[in-house]
Amino acid sequence: MTIRGADPAIVREALETGDPLPGTTGFAGELEGTLVRDVLGRVPLSVERATASPDAEQPAWAFSPADLEDPVPVPAGTVTDLEAIRPTDERSFERRFSLPDPEPTTDRDAALATLERAIESASEGVQAVDRNIAVAFSGGVDSALVAALLDAPLYVVGFPDSHDVEAARSAAEAMDRELTVVDLEPADLERVVPEIVRATGRTNAMDVQIALPLYLVGERVAADGYDALAVGQGADELFGGYEKVVRLDHRVEAETTRGAVREQIRSLPEQLPRDVLTIEATGLEPVAPLLHDEVVEAALRLPDALLADGETRKRGFRTVASNYLPDEIAQRDKKAVQYGSLVARELDRLARQAGYKRRMDDHVGQYVRSLLEDEA
């Protein structure tokens, strides 16, 4: 029996009742001969696509895809019998958990109070565990609220004069907190790209660009002696932080903002393993209090007016955050980390310098794969 992220008894009860949000920060692993993974895929879990023989040395499943020869992610919210893992290219998974679709709370104040209690409870749970935590701090409302509730050291990563470094400095000053700035150089990107690819199994440009700042800040945090890295992941998906959920453009299928927010929540199982595996590759434990089941449940019940519109995104979340942060921080909009840190720009520049021009198909992805070949 090997379960990560939650007490096995909680997972067992969740399987019996079908409760998709049983009060955890995610779980995955083996329970009584069955592989199980939570509804949002917050803990990575993969199985071997094909095994040469029943006595093969490669494990049939692993938390890290790097431990398998040909890994296949276990779909979020499913279970599979360990005995069903055979030398075959086909595998069926039984869906056991689905994302709830509750009616939105009609009382605005009650919805906000529930959300605030959920975020506070999740933060208290983080602090109840004995470990040294630092916060990946970009100066935006998500990481600032995590920082305010955990009262842990703040670290920001970026190239000189990047938006994130400037935003983090101004936010830390407004919050009267000290900040460690991890200044980047192009050589840092070249050095760690292979590490990220090995850890995540991903070589596409966007995933690598997003993972790079996480890895580089985690590397520094680990070197400074911390055990865990707290992040604000999940807020944009849960609370309506993306422009596309307001514009309802070609990037979403939904015809309403509420539907578009649910689409983004359902995208988390694809995104979160990248972030978790990247942080773990630095030797740190990832901590994401905004992705606790209680917070997810509160987010799903927010009325439409507390989601997003043309004026304000993450309205409900920002309202709660304003109880802990200066208003200028609670209402601040921020660039995505790969752009705010200038990592995407510099990786693109390195690719072009190496001969991978923008007119080429997936020129950054080709450059990423070339760095792996150079190490071979």
Image (cartoon, grey):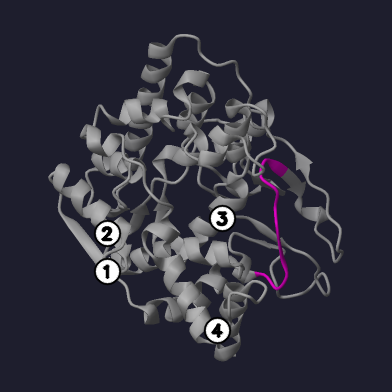
Q: Earlier in the sequence, mark 1 or mark 4?
A: 1
Q: CA distance from mark 3 to mark 1?
A: 29 Å
Give the residue number, with chain letter if any, for mark 2. 165
Which mark is drawn over residue 160? 1
Q: Which residues are magenta?
A: 68-78
Quadrant (top left, top right, bottom left, bottom right) of the C terminus: bottom right
Instruction: Please tell me whether residue 60 belongs to the stretch shown in magenta.
Output: no
At which x and y percent is residue 255?
A: 67, 28
Task: Check if mark 2's residue and mark 1's residue have beta carbons within 8 Å.
Answer: yes
Q: CA distance from mark 2 to mark 3?
A: 26 Å
**Helix or strand or loop: what does disc 2 sit on?**
helix
At which x and y percent is residue 61?
A: 68, 61
Q: Residue at x 56, y 77 (%)?
A: 368
What's the residue type where badge 4 is placed?
Answer: Leu
Q: Nearer the viewer, residue 335 or 192?
A: 335
Q: Earlier in the sequence, mark 2 or mark 3?
A: 2
Which mark is drawn over residue 371? 4
